[in-house]
Image: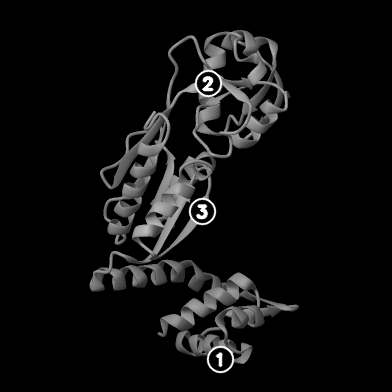
Amino acid sequence: MDTQFLANFLLVVDTGSFAEAARRLDLTASAVAQQVRALERELNTRLLARSGRTVQPTEAGYRLLERSRGLLQDITDLRLYVNDQPSVGELRLGTINTALHSIVPDTMAAFAATHPQVNVSIRFGTSAALFDALQAGELDAAVCLHPPFALTKGFAWEQLREEPLVVLAPASLKKRDAHELLRSEPLLRYDRTLGGGRQADRYLRRHGIAPRERFELNSIVAIAMMVERGLGVSLLPDISSPLTASLRVARIALPDEVERRRFGIIWPRSSARLQLILGLVTAAREVIAAMPGGRG
């Protein structure tokens, strides 16, 4: 079986059209259609069916789809392994939102400087979703929170930073008590489906603080912008992001010891892309070391 024909079949499915797949491949639509027909002859089954102006997989096509992505990825990994080319190839990285807005851009810049021939695809998601994707082999590494359970020996973890909870308030309120602000000012709540949001909720409950909630959202950068505009205060992890550095907001420490949010990089120890992953870890370490407060 020609693996390029298989890859082009996936592209037809993803785009829903021979014409669009052909445009991306710089081929004619008839050439792509011939490749799919060659697969159908080899497998002795029909793989695609027309639906209006688009094409969709048949039942057999869906079964091929389920297996072929992993197969093509394994072939790519095999080429890298056999040829021992740690500085070329593709790296599939997952990241949480706060890391995407803080350390990931600088980490990518440092990594690209030492691995200019590596193509990195970046996928955004929650820590739980990214860990599931790692287990399914859909990602090579993820920048995320440490899972709330002990990792198996099959995964490695590099902690990059610990971030305490702080009260984020307009700069004009910087001398006010943290608990007083949480009780008296409208609260811009950090999403409770996320690790940092759950930590903030536990803190409020433990100290008997019933805030006057205004919004709940999952972007710390957006929350910081709203705080600057006087819409309220927030209780969230103390991230270091260039997107919030210029905002006129105050970070007010909490009076009691607080749970710190731990985030870092996780990856499978047996990955065929291990050298690339370790290069990424090294780049992230350098970025964290240069940040104010370092590892927190």
Cα–Cα gap, marks 1 and 3: 33 Å
Above or below, 103 against 271 in this view is: above
Callout 2–callout 1 Cβ contact below 8 Å: no
Q: Residue furthest right?
A: 52
Looking at the picture, how far across and down is residue 218, in whole percent?
Answer: 61, 36
Residue receiving disc 3: 123
Q: Is residue 140 visible?
A: no
Callout 2–callout 3 Cβ contact below 8 Å: no
| Tag 1 secondary structure | helix
| Tag 2 secondary structure | strand
User: Residue at 29% across / 44% down in the picture?
Assistant: 156
Looking at the picture, how far across and down is residue 147, in whole percent?
Answer: 40, 36
Q: Nearer the viewer, residue 260 or 154?
A: 260
Sequence-wise, the earlier of marks 1 and 3 is: 1
Residue receiving disc 2: 166
Q: Which mark is residue 202?
A: none
Callout 1–callout 3 Cβ contact below 8 Å: no
Above or below, 290 against 36 in this view is: above
Sequence-wise, the earlier of marks 2 and 1 is: 1
Q: Which of pointers 2 and 3 indicates the residue nearer the eye?
A: 2
Mark 2 Cα shell of 10 Å, populated few (<14), some (14-19), many (≥20): many
**In the rendered structure, which amino acid carries the disc numbered 2?**
Val
Q: Nearer the viewer, residue 63 or 84?
A: 84
Looking at the picture, how far across and down is residue 95, in whole percent?
Answer: 48, 47
User: Residue at 42% across / 85% down in the picture?
Assistant: 2
72 horizontally vs 27: left or right: left
Residue receiving disc 1: 34
Q: Nearer the viewer, residue 235 or 283?
A: 283
How many numbered discs, if any? 3
